[in-house]
Image (cartoon, rainbow, N blue to C red):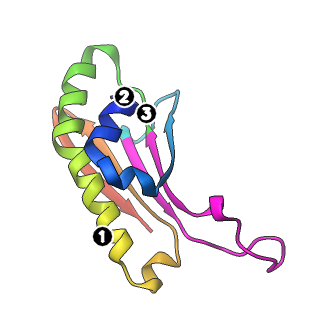
Amino acid sequence: MTATDISEALDDQMAHVSDVSFLTGHSEEGYVLGIEWTAAQPFNYGRGIHPDASGFRIDVLPVPAADRADARTALRTYALPQLGEWINQALAAPETWRSSDHRRYWRLADGLLTHHDQH
């Protein structure tokens, strides 16, 4: 998957994403895509919140070469629309949700794409 795939799928939602990282190394759990909401938290003993310290970040993990074409199709067809919906839900979430960190990861195993949430 490429940065263009992500930008095209998310379109206007990309304005809310502060970072897209293409990581090296594989996830022990088999994750191939992740999004994280980092809540605004005070730094420097309460002297304010740096604006770059909160928001959405996307991680793309490598896939074995033999699986790349199928993975890209599955991620573009299913995971990226779900990722966009997750962003929409997060933007509309109440302050109690937005005040803590949240993550969603997608795993592709045996041709099946699944996701897992962490709070």
Q: Which mark is residue 89?
A: 1
- Where is residue 51 drawn, in percent x and y? 65, 64
Q: Measuring 76% from the left and 71% from the top, which residue is drawn there?
A: 43
The N terminus sits in image quarter: top left
Picture quarter containing residue 27?
Answer: top left
From the image, tell me which residue sits under label 3: 61
- Where is residue 44 drawn, in percent x and y? 83, 71
From the image, tell me which residue sits under label 2: 2
Left or right: 114, with 29 as reference point: left
Say whether disc 3 or disc 1 marks the residue closer to the N-terminus.
3
Q: Measuring 27% from the left and 14% from the top, which residue is drawn there?
A: 66
The C terminus sits in image quarter: bottom left
Label 2 Cα neighbours within 10 Å, binned few <14 / some 14-19 / many ≥20: few
- Residue 39 lies in magenta, yes or no? yes
The magenta segment is: 33-59
Q: Measuring 82% from the left and 77% from the top, which residue is drawn there?
A: 47
- Where is residue 56 drawn, in percent x and y? 48, 57
Q: Measuring 37% from the left and 70% from the top, which residue is drawn there?
A: 90
Helix, strand or loop status at disc 1: helix
- Where is residue 110 drawn, in percent x and y? 18, 32
2 and 1 marks in contact (CB < 8 Å): no
Picture quarter containing residue 31?
Answer: top left
Q: Is residue 39 above or below residue 15?
A: below
Q: Nearer the viewer, mark 3 or mark 1?
A: 1
Left or right: 106, with 45 as reference point: left
- The Cα–Cα distance between marks 2 and 1, rounded to whole angstroms, is 24 Å
